[in-house]
Amino acid sequence: MAVIRKVASVKPDYQYTTAQIIECADRLWLSHIEPEVRRAALKIFNSAEIQSRNSAFPIETVFSDLSFKEKNDLYIDAAIRLGEKALEKALVDSQTKATDIDFIITTSCTGFMIPSVDAYLINKLGLRRNVKRL
């Protein structure tokens, strides 16, 4: 019988309101785009009805002119760091040893990782090699 011992999540260091995101996006990212495309992008932000968003990076980094690879490398580092923090929290809170884990489910968004964050966590925290991953 499968048992969920603990669900843990962590938030990254930064949180921005939609108004802050729109201001920064408009200033740093959308300022050189055709007016109709700019209006459409801003409408998406405004219509999402999301009050705030969390970020692993300062907003200026998110909308900077760093290359895709540079931003993705930052994402990978942050995903591993935050994933490790969440898994450690779940293990401590549930009084479970890493070697007792049979199945690990991770979610993440925005960047691309191969192998994915769970593979790094298996190595970093000493989970069994045969742990199932989703």
Image: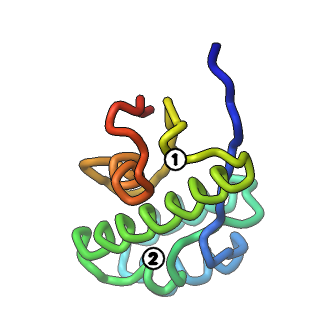
Quadrant (top left, top right, bottom left, bottom right) of the N terminus: top right
Q: At which x and y percent is residue 66? A: 29, 81
Q: Nearer the viewer, residue 61 or 73?
A: 73
Kindly identify the residue that appears in the image at 38 percent across and 83 percent down.
64
Quadrant position of residue 68: bottom left
Residue 98 has which mark?
Answer: 1
Q: Residue at x 39, y 39 (%)?
A: 128
Is 29 on the left-hand or right-hand side of 93? left
Task: Bin the neighbour count of mark 2 within 10 Å (Cα to Cα): few under 14, some 14-19, many 20 and up.
Answer: some
- Secondary structure at badge 2 equals helix
Horizontal side of residue 128 vs 108, given as left or right:
left
Residue, disc 2:
62
Q: Tell me which amino acid carries mark 2.
A: Val
Where residue 129 appears, x then y in whole percent?
32, 38
* Residue 22 picture location, percent across and down: 61, 74
| 71 relative position to 62: left or right | left
Q: Give the quadrant of residue 131.
A: top left
Name the image quarter holding residue 120.
bottom left
Tell me the kind of residue under disc 1: Ala
The percent position of residue 59, horizontal first and vertical second, equals 53, 81
Q: Nearer the viewer, mark 1 or mark 2?
A: 1
Residue shown at 41%/52% (left/top)?
Answer: 126
Q: Is 69 drawn above or below residue 66 in the view shown?
A: above
